[in-house]
Amino acid sequence: MNDAADGDSGSPPGRVESIAIASDHAGVELKAKMVAELKRMGLHVNDMGADTVAPSDYPDFAHPLARRISSGEAQRGILLCGSGIGVDIVANRYPHVRAALSWMPEIAELSRRHNDSNVLVVPSRFVSDADGMEIMKRWLTTEFEGGRHSRRVNKIDDDDIRAGLDGDADATG
């Protein structure tokens, strides 16, 4: 695990400058390729593990990354595990985290454009390395559209709506 930056001195406009990334054992190989590409793109990479293919527990890596996003210490992150489901569930338990399980570039793009996702989740056992890289690149280069989507995204962390106190939305349906 390390913090490192290599490559060009900056990122193109609209791109995140720094990114946290983590995986369990199932995502280690694809994560290593993603880290190399992120560095090549000139991004600062905070690799939060795992570092080996020895069996590991996905919550041990998803919780620290999600905490960094939730607290504002990191702007964006990438999580990988075999199906992506486990790390997605963990990450989305944190306030202000909008983790999006993306198995194709179009899903990753929509998660940014419409949902302002700040954590990309990749199912490493269900995508090729090439597809994983394209998913990551599409997610990194897509901007949030705002507009009507902002209203919807703001409702995700609205405590009144979650408690059923807003008067406009039925929290049960």
Image (tube, grey):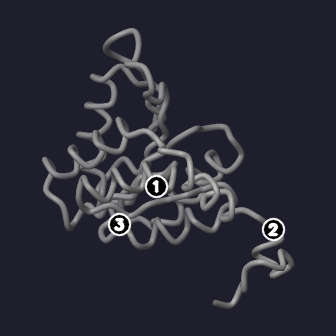
Kind of element beneath mark 3? loop
Q: Which residue is mark 1?
A: 114
Q: Which residue is mark 2?
A: 159
Q: Amino acid at mark 1?
A: His
- Residue 137 place in picture, x, y as percent: 28, 39
Q: Which residue is mark 3?
A: 55
Q: Amino acid at mark 2?
A: Asp
Q: Amino acid at mark 3?
A: Pro
Circle nearer the N terminus (1, 3): 3
The foreground one among 27 and 107 is 107
Query: Residue at image x 50%, y 59%?
Result: 99
Q: Nearer the viewer, mark 2 or mark 3?
A: 2
Task: From the viewer's perspective, tell me whether residue 169 is left or right of residue 124.
Answer: right
Give the distance between the C-alpha atoms of the residues marked 2 and 1, in whole angstroms: 21 Å
Query: Residue at image x 66%, y 62%?
Result: 94
Give the distance between the C-alpha atoms of the residues marked 2 and 3, in whole angstroms: 38 Å
Q: Nearer the viewer, mark 1 or mark 3?
A: 1
